[in-house]
Every structure is written in structure tokens, then in C-alpha cells.
Image (cartoon, rainbow, N blue to C red):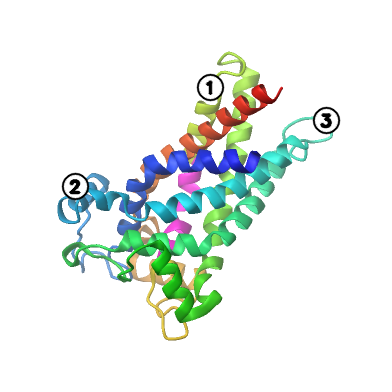
Amino acid sequence: MDFLMSGLAACGACVFTNPLEVVKTRMQLQGELQAPGTYQRHYRNVFHAFFTIGKVDGLAALQKGLAPALLYQFLMNGIRLGTYGLAEAKGYLHTAEGAHSPFRSAAAGALAGVLGAYLGSPIYMVKTHLQAQAASEIAVGHQYKHQGMFQALARIGQKHGLVGLWRGALGGLPRVIAGSSTQLCTFSSTKDLITQWELFPPQSWKVALAAAMVSGVAVVLAMTPFDVVSTRLYNQPTDTQGKGLMYRGVLDALLQTARTEGVFGMYKGIGASYFRLGPHTILSLFFWDQLRSLYYAYAK
């Protein structure tokens, strides 16, 4: 049930935040490996990107990649939060004295995140491809021209095999390690502190909401550079063997981005990342905590 509730919580959050994921993906691909000021900026900021996509691609385009996004969230977060929840329930995240251990929480969050992200990597890659697809006048990054999730998975699988389906999987892991460990560690620690300080009534939904808000800020700060690199690794064009033509890996992508676009290039789309990751973190952790509370109350 922990795995099921975790997956459902993440899907609930995803429905609301997927338009921001579309905006974030396009802003991260805009001006890829081009010096600032040498390319046309189709998306000036989050709000301008929303308006531009809605006007040129149509309002439905703001929910591009929703099917793989939901499937990825269910798989990745079902495994991630479910595994973390089991570790918490078994007492592995507490010291011998019974106190909450931030180090153990961070380690458990990172390991659970890596497992979920690696297994869901092909879905995330297809999601990135679909969300990057746009009308030619506002297109950024490589355009794959997929017709849908299943067609994309079948096409990549037929062309490049299993290796092609998991292309970029290792490059996406630093993003998940940074985000997952930060999210779960800060959420649990903040929740414990708020409970100790008695800011809200015991078992109040406000405790989970406040802890999730703090966690969301920490995740955005830790994860954005790795998120930019992950998006670009997944979306880069490939040769006939399925090997990326632009980047050799995470370090190469970071160095090339910093060299050509400056340090701020690694923080492209940070506004969209904040508006997307913050609410997504808040909603997914809030739904997760409330579903678990309801389940355990009903089970008893």
C-alpha cells in the first residue's frame, strides 16, 4: 500500500504541475550551447513562455507529455516514497536513542530515488522529447517528432534496442540524488521540528504542508543545475548507434554549458523550476502524508 499511495500522490501533483514542466523543459533547451545574446529568445520568462506556447502551439500543448509524466511519477515516486516510507516505518531512519537522523534520511532518500529514476528512465526520456516538440517558429533543442508515448518507446526500442531506451539514465541520476535526498531529508526533519515546537495541533494537515513548503525551496536550490543537464542529455540528437552527438556525459554537459553559456546557463529555467518543483513537492508530499494518515487510521 505504501508504494501505491506514493505513486497516486505523485500523479495527483503531476496533473497540476505538468504545464510548468513543459515550460521548464523548453526554457532549459533554449539557446543550448550558444553564447548569451547570440540567439532568439522565444521564452523570456515563465509567464511569457505560458503565453507563447498557448498562442502558437495551442492550450493543449501545455499538457504535452502528460501520459509519460503520469506513468513516470507513479513508477519513480511509488518506488522512491514507498521504499523511504518502509525504511521510516521499520525505524531505520532513527538513531539508537530514537531521534531522527538527517544523514540516514538523506542516504535513504538518495538510494530510493536512484532506484526509481533508473527504472523509469525510458519514460522520462520520451516525456522530455514530447514536451520539447513545438511549432517551428518557437522550437528549441532537437525535435524528435514523436506521435505519442507508445509510438516513441517502440521506435527507440526498434532502432537502438534496450541500450537506446536507457540512454541518459546515468546522466539523470545526479539530479535525482540531489533532489530526492534533499526533499525527503528536509521534509522529515522539518516535520519533526514543527511537531516539537507545537506550532500546529497534533496530526494537523498544516504540519505536512509547512514541512513540504520548506522542502520545496531546498529542492529547487540543490537540483536545478543537474536538471538542466539531464534535460539536455535526454533530448540531444543521436547517431545510428544511439550515441549522443552533443554530450558524452554529465560532466561534459556541465563543462560545455558553463563554457559557452556561463554559470547562469546551468540555471536556465530556474523560475519555471521553482514554480514547478515547489508546488509539485508540496502537493506530492502533502498527498502522500494525508493518504498514509487515512490508510493507517482506516486500517486500525
Is mark 2 in CB contact (under 8 Å) with mark 3?
A: no
Give the spatial CA distance, label 1 vs label 2. Answer: 34 Å
Q: Which residue is mark 2?
A: 51
Using the image as rendered, state which of residue 215 and residue 282 is in the foreground: 282
**Which amino acid type is marked by label 3?**
Glu
Query: Vertical placement of 222 versus 140: above or below?
Result: above
Q: Residues within 10 Å of mark 2 (few under 14, many from 20)?
A: some
Image-quadrant location for residue 159: bottom left
Q: Residue furthest right?
A: 96
Question: What residue is shown at x 59% (from left), y 23% (from top)?
Answer: 194
Query: Vertical placement of 194 versus 160: above or below?
Result: above
Q: Residue furthest top?
A: 201
Query: Vertical placement of 291 versus 220: above or below?
Result: above
| Residue 97 image position (x, y, % from top left) | 83, 30
Using the image as rendered, state which of residue 139 and residue 254 is in the foreground: 139
| Residue 14 image position (x, y, % from top left) | 43, 44
Using the image as rendered, state which of residue 141 and residue 199 is in the foreground: 141
- Sequence-wise first label, 2 or 3: 2
Q: Quadrant of the N terminus?
A: top right
Relative to residue 81, is residue 259 drawn left or right? left
**Which amino acid type is marked by label 1?**
Trp
SS for callout 3: loop
Question: What residue is shown at x 38% (from left), y 51% (from top)?
Answer: 66
Give the spatial CA distance, label 2 vs label 3. Answer: 54 Å
Image-quadrant location for residue 106: top right
Q: In the rendered image, is residue 274 in sight?
A: no
Label number found at residue 97: 3
**The magenta stretch spans residue 69:** no
| Residue extent of the magenta highlight | 218-232
**Which amino acid type is marked by label 2?**
Phe
Q: Which residue is mark 1?
A: 205
Relative to residue 285, is residue 53 drawn left or right? left
